[in-house]
Image (cartoon, grey):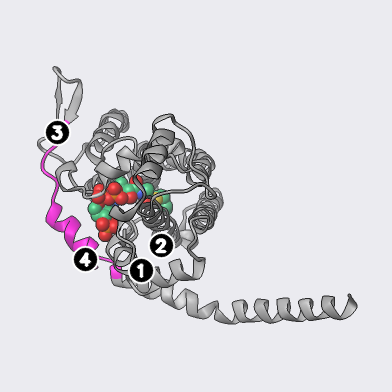
Amino acid sequence: MYAQALNARDPAPVQAEDLERLAAFQARIDAEEKIEPNVWMPEQYRRTLIRQISQHAHSEIIGMQPEGNWVTRAPTLKRKAQLLAKIQDEAGHGLYLYSAAETLGVSREELYDQLLSGQAKYSSIFNYPTLTYADMGAIGWLVDGAAIMNQIPLCRCSYGPYARAMILICKEESFHQRQGYDIMIAMCHGTPAQRAMAQDALNRFWWPSLMMFGPHDTNSVHSELSMKWKIKRFTNDGLRQKFIDATVPQAQYLGLSIPDPNLRFNDGTSHWEHGPIDWDEFARVLAGDGPCNRQRMKHRRQAEADGAWVREAAAAYATKQRAAAERAA
Ligand code: FAQ
C-alpha cells in the first residue's frame, strides 16, 4: 500500500534484474511452485509482497478498534465473549502477517513505524464508525465476508509464508462471518426497532464493503503484475462481483434490502449488476479524510506510547537474563 515509499528507498531499478533469473522465477510461478524466503526473487516481487502483507497486517490491527468500541456494550455475556474472541483473533492475524512480512527482510519495527507515521495504508473500511450494536453483525457478515472472498485465493498465493498464513486466517474469518450473520439473523427476527437497526447497519456498511476490494480494474495499478506473479488470482472487480453474487441472496434471506436502487439480476450473465460506486469517497478515505481516520490513528499511536514501558521492561529483563546466563556459563 505504500509502494511509492518503498520505491523511493530502493536504489536498484527493477529492469536491472538478470533476465535469465527472471525467466526461471516466472517458470517456477507458472509451474505453481511456492516461492520461499531463501529463493531468489525479483526486488519488485519482494516489495509488492511487503506492501500487501503489511497493509493486511495493519488492517487487522486497526480493524480491532471499530469492534473494541462495543466490547463493554454487547447485549449479553455470550455476545461479549464472542466479540472479545473475535478481536483477539484479529490481533493474532496481525502478528501472524507481520511475521510473514518479516521473512522478506523487513523488520516489524519498520512496519510499525510506517503505520504510525501515516506512510502505510490500511483497509479503508476501518475508517467508518460503528454506531450501533447491529454494526457488529454487519461487520462480521459483510466485512469478514468481503475479507474471505478476497483472501481465500491468497491461500494459493505464490509466496509460501503468506499462502500458509492465509489458511488459518481464512478459517477464522469464515467463523467470524457466520458469527456476524448470526447477529443479523437474531436482529432481523427481533423487534421492529432491532430490524431497523440491522437495515441501517447494512445501509451504512454496504458501499464501504464493496470498496474493500480496491479500485475498479482499470485503475488498479498493481493488479497486472500481481496476477502475473500469482500473488493475486483474481482482479478487484472479479472478486467484488463474486462477493455481491454471494451476499445478495443472504440479504434476501434476512428480509433486508441492499441500498442500491440500480441493483438487478442479469439473467444473461447470472450476475447481480450494481450501481456506481462513489470512488470520490474512496479516494477521500484513502487520503486520510474518512469519518474516523484521525481517531483510529490517534488511538493506535496512544496505544503504542502506553505500551512503551512494557517493551522497555521486557528488553531490560531479557538483558538481565542474558547477563545472568553468561555469568553462569
Ligand atoms: N483500502 O492496485 P490496487 C479484514 C490501495 S483485512 C485502502 O488495486 P492491490 C479482516 C492499494 O494498496 C482487510 N487502500 O492494489 C478484518 C494501492 O495503494 P498503493 C484488508 C486500498 O494491492 C475483518 C492502491 O489503492 N485485506 O478485513 C484499498 O493490487 C473484520 C491501488 O490499488 C487485505 O489487505 C482499500 N480498500 O489490491 C479485521 C487483503 N484498495 O500501495 C477486522 C490483502 C486498494 O499503490 C474486522 N490485500 N487500496 O499506495 C489485497 O488483496 C490487495 O492489497 C487489495 C488491493 C485488493 C486490497
| Tag of residue 56 | none
Task: Please tell me which of labels 3 and 4 falls first in the chain.
Answer: 3
Tag 2 residue? 62
- Asked if ligand 1 lies within 8 A of label 2, the reply is no
| Tag of residue 263 | 3
- Asked if ligand 1 lies within 8 A of label 4, the reply is no
The three-letter code of the residue at mark 1 reads: Arg
Q: Secondary structure at mark 4?
A: loop
Tag 4 residue? 287
Of 141 and 288, the residue lying toward us:
288
- Residue furthest to the top in view is 268
Q: Is residue 310 above or below residue 167?
A: below
Tag 1 residue? 296
The three-letter code of the residue at mark 3 reads: Leu
Task: Please tell me which of labels 2 and 4 falls first in the chain.
Answer: 2
Task: Give the residues in magenta.
Answer: 273-293
Q: Residue at x 39, y 60 (%)?
A: 66
Measure how far apart labels 2 and 4 are at the Cα level.
16 Å
- Where residue 31 appears, as percent x and y from the top left, is 43, 29
Measure how far apart labels 4 and 1 are at the Cα level.
14 Å
Task: Please tell me which of labels 3 and 2 falls first in the chain.
Answer: 2
Quadrant position of residue 127:
bottom left
The three-letter code of the residue at mark 4 reads: Ala
Quadrant position of residue 10:
bottom left
Confirm or deny contact between disc 4 and disc 1 (CB under 8 A). no
Q: Give the quarter of the figure containing the C terminus.
A: bottom right
Q: Is residue 256 above or below residue 18?
A: above
- Where residue 97 appears, as percent x and y from the top left, is 49, 53
